[in-house]
Image (tube, rainbow, N blue to C red):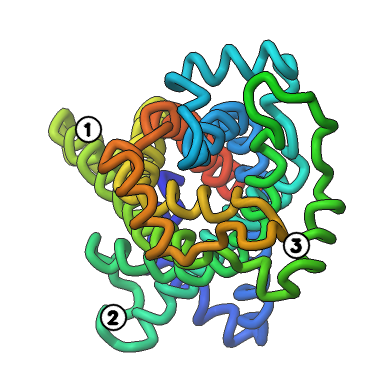
Amino acid sequence: MESASQGRVEPEISITAAATSAAGLKPRTAVMEALEDVTYGSIAGVVGKYIEYPFDTVKVRLQSQPDHLPLRYKGPLDCFRQSIRADGVLGLYRGISAPLVGAALETSSLFFFERIGREAIYASGLVPRGQELPLSALYFTGAFSGVFTSFLLTPIELVKCKIQVPATEAGGAKTAPLRPGAVIRDIFRHYGVLGFWHGQMGTLIREAGGCAAWFGSKETSTKLLRGLNERAATSPEDLARMRAAPLPLWQQALAGASAGMSYNFLFFPADTVKSRMQTSPLGVPGGPRRSFIGETKELWKQAGWRGFYRGCGVTVIRSAPSSAFIFMVYDGLKKSFPMQ
């Protein structure tokens, strides 16, 4: 299967749906498809998170450096060096338990809501059912998926960011790593239930725009690579075989990598503002708890446009293998272990 959305042959789905409907199994078919999205998306998300998490820790630490002090880290390599010196390599995985849950939830939700977005387009009549969706529609379904997923992610990312960022400045006393349970209790005590959605605007912008780029770039790259492959066909039979087969593994990885890099680069400033909001101290009297606009103004005043891209390079680099593995694992599991 070449992708999560265009890899299916839509006419076959239509015939299958009609047959299962006649047998009274259509609800089960829909449930099993959703179960595939959740199960295989969760597994793919966990694999991707283990690959990217040390780089994500460095990204958050670079993004969240305070306004009122000199920059603690000179860049990604310096941040890696200081972090390993202070806490060892395992310190880069500090707080990974919550993000593993978040990765499973995020990836499964993205594929699940993307499927709902496609079904909404077919149900609206904009595209006849059984016809392949155009790329513009797939960018829309990606954005649709990102909007809903953002509301699930913000609380998890809030806890993750507070655990990842050291509580002390350089030269200060070393403190014990925060635990998810303690962070959750502190957030609830100071701000109540709604406090878990601090930074929601940044997550919404990043996920809506980023997921449009994630799914859209994956499908665009897949289409371009398939077109290049088909040009090399030497006969009609060879062409039919190419169209029926998935892309070679390295091309699947390349398409997935392009998706991850697009997702992370295009809306990185919104993620920077979100990280700064989510790493602000809890319950400090008169302390900063700025809005998205307020945090954006403060960052611009402090560092200009460069401040919005702190950690961007390391984030884009780590997103390539992570996203490639996510798509390869997800598509591979759906092809090898179909639940229908």
Eyeballing the image, is 2 above or below 133? above
Left or right position of 137 against 100? left
Alpha carbon of mark 2 to alpha carbon of mark 1: how far? Answer: 28 Å
Q: Look at mark 3 in the image and give the residue it sits on.
A: 187
Eyeballing the image, is 45 above or below 140? above
- Amino acid type, residue under disc 3 in the picture: Ile
Residue in the image at 26% along x and 79% along y:
127
Of circles 3 and 2, the one toward us is: 3
The C terminus lies in quadrant: bottom right
Q: Look at mark 2 in the image and give the residue it sits on.
A: 128
Counting residues from the start of the chain, the first of labels 3 and 1 encountered is: 3
Left or right position of 96 against 140? right
Eyeballing the image, is 233 above or below 213? above
Q: Look at mark 1 in the image and give the residue it sits on.
A: 229
Counting residues from the start of the chain, the first of labels 2 and 1 encountered is: 2
Counting residues from the start of the chain, the first of labels 3 and 2 encountered is: 2
**Residue 4 in picture, x, y percent from top left:** 46, 53
**Residue 184 in picture, x, y percent from top left:** 79, 58
Of circles 3 and 1, the one toward us is: 3
| Dot 3 and dot 1 residues touching (CB under 8 Å) | no
Residue in the image at 43% along x and 63% along y:
292
Q: Can you see residue 214?
A: no
Q: Quadrant of residue 314?
A: top left
- Amino acid type, residue under disc 1 in the picture: Asn
Secondary structure beneath dot 1 equals helix
Q: Residues within 10 Å of mark 1 (few under 14, many from 20)?
A: some
